[in-house]
Image: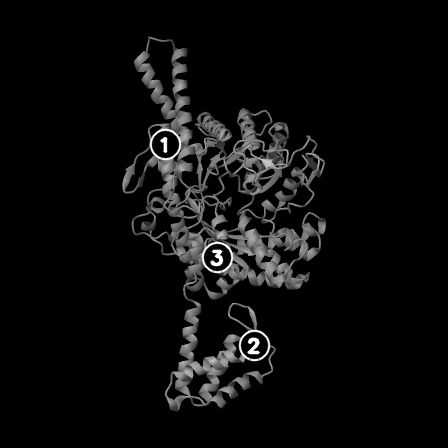
């Protein structure tokens, strides 16, 4: 007989464990309440006599209790029940010891690599991570229903950010920075009035970002268009100063040049403040703020010229990078940049094409920015263009009482992601079985998401004044609950998913790029979207379907399934699942075809969608990148391309790592030869149609090539 344990694991039946448990209860009671040894053996024998192939451990224990009471040994039965309950408490005892100690000793690999903005070695960050491990433990044992915790452990779903679930805080947001700069805010009980200059506005903005990031998890997005007004204030201030001081002493043209020089100096200093403050500030979570700057030039913006100058300077400084401790210019991870392509800057003769050309140069060298097509986004979001949140998810549209669309000052309540490949593995190609399992697991996801929602209900504004009282999200009264912001679609809550490629391969035998695979993939995606839409209608909460870019989750799900189901070709054998709806990296598909194919899923996955391609080092072929940017504007809502250049993690060298006479990679700056501590791109003669290339005379390396 096999015994099914509480966590779902299957173990061999062991009669000695049953006998031992009854004997331990027997010792605790008076002699007249004890059960003779032959009766204990008889009880165990009766269980074995049932002839079951498998039994739940709970069923075995229930039978023992019934048998004890049938023998009239009620005190013994009660003692056994107490023993059973005590064992349950032991099982639910604190389980964080190992994870916390491994954090302190810097060998908790999963936690250390989960967030790119957390340095898990630093003491202040470790404090946050240790608190996170405690939160995860309490969430698993006490705060979530057992079936949700079990589903998370088994990789059926992923309950994101359990390390913060213990507190009444939320995921990502779009900071209402315009309101906070215009109407002032309060930090640390000190009034911060509306800035009078660009430099001060930049400083205040970064302080707001830091304060906001300290009282939530996830990312914070800021639309830089609100800074244009303050650059003009600086210009007006300098103009007034020079006119009062030099009126009738210098000609107007020279005076205008003085004003222009001062404005450019302040522009450079202000943007530098943003860049350095964000990269040097540490939140109370012991991490850098997870910030996204939204770079969008709106045609009807009264400050469009000032904002064009600001965006240009942001890109210039990102192109240059910032110096690390060795004095070497490196690419900062934050702030993330999202650049909007519109008619006036889509490289088709617009007035601001020069800024887009700078963005392309920046992408060729430094990875960022991401690109959003205003044209495609307007098609998908009722004519609106707005920033994604830090997690790259999008809010659903929402109108205030006057019928005006609003996006800034809104937020995401949290995410639960579904493991699609695991359903395909269990279904074994049987579609009827697949859809049945999917429905069951969607119900689990809904219940898990409602746990997130209910955990926020009743939260009072005093929990985070910067969010709820002083403008980042709202201006509620002290003691007022945030409940009205959780309902009627004002905030969102996200159903994520991993592995559309793998589940399609399992169910159809072909990739999602094949006609049969595409048909199945779209049916599945539309079912997920209908689930989110139905939940929204039923609850009034803004549910959205979210293509998560959580790289670590792709590996976690695959690792769980490989242990449970073994190595499956093109599924678990790779060691990872493909993110959301993306085409697998091993597919032979060119960059533009990949964008074109994936764009059809962005419309469905409107709660979060980004597509990306990786291309070789293109610093000397900017025209090719510009063609990709034009294609993004016409054909896909949200995309990025990662150009690969050499990088040494020891000294921060960002250039071309050489190959020495021993055919070893070697950093020309610090001499590092440890391959695990450097990124090395392939070397080519410029021809992109070849799948192999030679290093020196003897080494041949396999490479994937994306044709442009």
Residue 446 visible in the snapshot: yes
Which is more foreground, mark 3 or mark 2?
2
Residue 373 visible in the snapshot: no
Q: In whole angstroms, how far apart are the C-alphas of marks 1 and 2?
A: 69 Å
Picture quadrant where residue 571 is located? bottom right
Picture quadrant where residue 224 is located? top left
Which residue has dot 2 on it? 13
Front-most of 605 and 262?
262
Image coords of residue 324 (percent x, y): 45, 34
Of callouts 1 and 2, which one flags the residue occurring earlier in the amino acid sequence?
2
**Residues at marks 1 and 2 touching, judged by CB atoms closer than 8 Å:** no
Of callouts 3 and 2, which one flags the residue occurring earlier in the amino acid sequence?
2
Image coords of residue 19 (percent x, y): 49, 82
Image coords of residue 337 (percent x, y): 49, 36
Q: Determine whether 237 is above or below 53 in the image.
A: above
Quadrant of the drawing holding the N terminus: bottom right
Q: In whole angstroms, how far apart are the C-alphas of marks 3 and 1?
A: 38 Å
Which residue has dot 1 on it? 201
The residue sitting at the bottom extreme is 32
Q: Quick one: SS at disc 3?
A: helix
- Residue at (52%, 67%) from the top-left corner? 7
Q: In whole angstroms, how far apart are the C-alphas of marks 3 and 2?
A: 37 Å
Q: Quick one: SS at disc 1?
A: helix
**Residues at marks 3 and 1 touching, judged by CB atoms closer than 8 Å:** no
Q: Determine whether 507 is above or below 385 in the image.
A: below
Front-most of 510 and 668?
668
Which residue has dot 3 on it? 449
Which is more foreground, mark 1 or mark 2?
2
């Amino acid at each position: 007989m096999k015994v099914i344990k509480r966590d779902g694991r299957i173990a061999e039946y062991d009669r000695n464990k049953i006998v031992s448990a009854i004997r331990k209860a027997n010792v605790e009671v008076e002699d007249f309440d004890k059960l003779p040894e032959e009766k204990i053996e008889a009880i165990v024998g009766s269980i074995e006599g049932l002839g079951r192939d498998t039994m739940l451990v709970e069923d075995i224990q229930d039978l023992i209790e019934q048998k004890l009471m049938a023998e009239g040994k009620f005190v013994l039965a009660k003692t056994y029940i107490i023993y059973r309950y005590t064992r349950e408490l032991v099982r639910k005892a604190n389980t964080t010891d190992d994870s916390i100690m491994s954090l302190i000793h810097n060998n908790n690999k999963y936690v250390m690599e989960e967030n790119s903005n957390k340095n898990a070695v630093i003491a202040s960050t470790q404090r946050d991570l240790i608190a996170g491990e405690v939160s995860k433990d309490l969430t698993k044992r006490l705060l979530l229903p057992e079936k949700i915790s079990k589903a998370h452990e088994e990789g059926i779903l992923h309950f994101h950010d359990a390390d913060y679930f213990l507190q009444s805080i939320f995921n990502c947001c779009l900071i209402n920075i315009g309101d906070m700069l215009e109407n002032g805010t309060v930090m640390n009980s000190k009034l911060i009035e509306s800035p009078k200059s660009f430099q001060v506005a930049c400083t205040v903005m970064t302080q707001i970002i830091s304060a906001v990031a300290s009282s939530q998890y996830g990312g914070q997005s800021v639309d830089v268009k609100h800074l244009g007004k303050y650059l003009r204030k600086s210009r007006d201030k300098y103009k007034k100063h020079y006119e009062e001081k030099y009126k009738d002493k210098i000609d107007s043209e020279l005076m205008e040049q003085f004003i222009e020089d001062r404005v450019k100096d302040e522009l450079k200093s202000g943007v530098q403040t943003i860049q350095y403050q964000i990269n040097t500030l540490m939140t109370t979570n012991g991490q850098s703020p997870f910030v996204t700057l939204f770079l969008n030039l709106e045609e009807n913006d009264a400050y469009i010229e000032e904002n064009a100058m600001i965006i240009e300077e942001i890109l210039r400084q990102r192109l240059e990078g910032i110096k690390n401790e060795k004095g070497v210019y490196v690419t900062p991870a934050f702030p993330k940049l999202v650049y909007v392509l519109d008619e006036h800057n889509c490289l088709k003769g617009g007035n601001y094409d020069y800024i887009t050309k700078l963005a392309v140069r920046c992408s060729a060298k430094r990875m960022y920015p991401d690109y959003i097509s205003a044209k495609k986004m307007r098609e998908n979001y009722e004519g609106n263009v707005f920033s994604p949140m830090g997690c790259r998810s999008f809010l659903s549209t929402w109108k205030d009482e006057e019928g005006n669309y609003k996006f800034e000052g809104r937020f995401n309540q949290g995410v639960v992601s579904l493991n699609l490949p695991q359903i395909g593995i269990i279904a074994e190609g049987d579609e009827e079985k697949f859809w049945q399992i999917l429905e069951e697991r969607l119900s689990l996801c809904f219940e898990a998401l409602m746990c997130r929602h209910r955990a926020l209900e009743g939260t009072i504004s005093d929990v985070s004044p910067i969010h709820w009282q002083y403008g980042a999200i709202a201006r509620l009264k002290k003691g007022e609950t945030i409940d009205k912001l959780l309902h009627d679609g004002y905030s969102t809550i996200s159903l994520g998913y991993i592995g559309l490629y793998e589940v399609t391969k399992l169910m159809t035998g072909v990739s999602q790029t094949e006609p049969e695979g595409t048909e199945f993939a779209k049916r599945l995606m539309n079912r997920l979207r209908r689930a989110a839409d139905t939940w929204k209608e039923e609850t009034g909460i803004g549910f959205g379907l979210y293509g998560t870019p959580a790289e670590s989750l792709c590996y976690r799900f695959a690792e769980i399934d490989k242990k449970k189901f073994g190595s499956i070709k093109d599924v678990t054998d790779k060691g990872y699942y493909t993110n959301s709806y993306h085409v697998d990296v091993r597919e032979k598909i060119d960059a533009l075809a990949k964008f074109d194919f994936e764009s059809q899923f962005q419309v469905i996955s409107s709660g979060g969608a980004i597509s990306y391609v990786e291309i070789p080092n293109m610093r000397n072929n900017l025209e090719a990148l510009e063609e990709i940017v034009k294609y993004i504007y016409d054909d896909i809502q949200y995309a990025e391309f990662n150009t690969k250049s050499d990088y040494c993690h020891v000294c921060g060298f960002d250039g071309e790592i050489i190959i020495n006479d021993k055919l070893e990679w070697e950093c020309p700056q610090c001499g590092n030869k440890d391959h695990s501590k450097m990124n090395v791109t392939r070397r080519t003669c410029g021809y992109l149609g070849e799948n192999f290339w030679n290093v020196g005379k003897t080494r041949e390396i396999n490479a994937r090539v994306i044709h442009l």
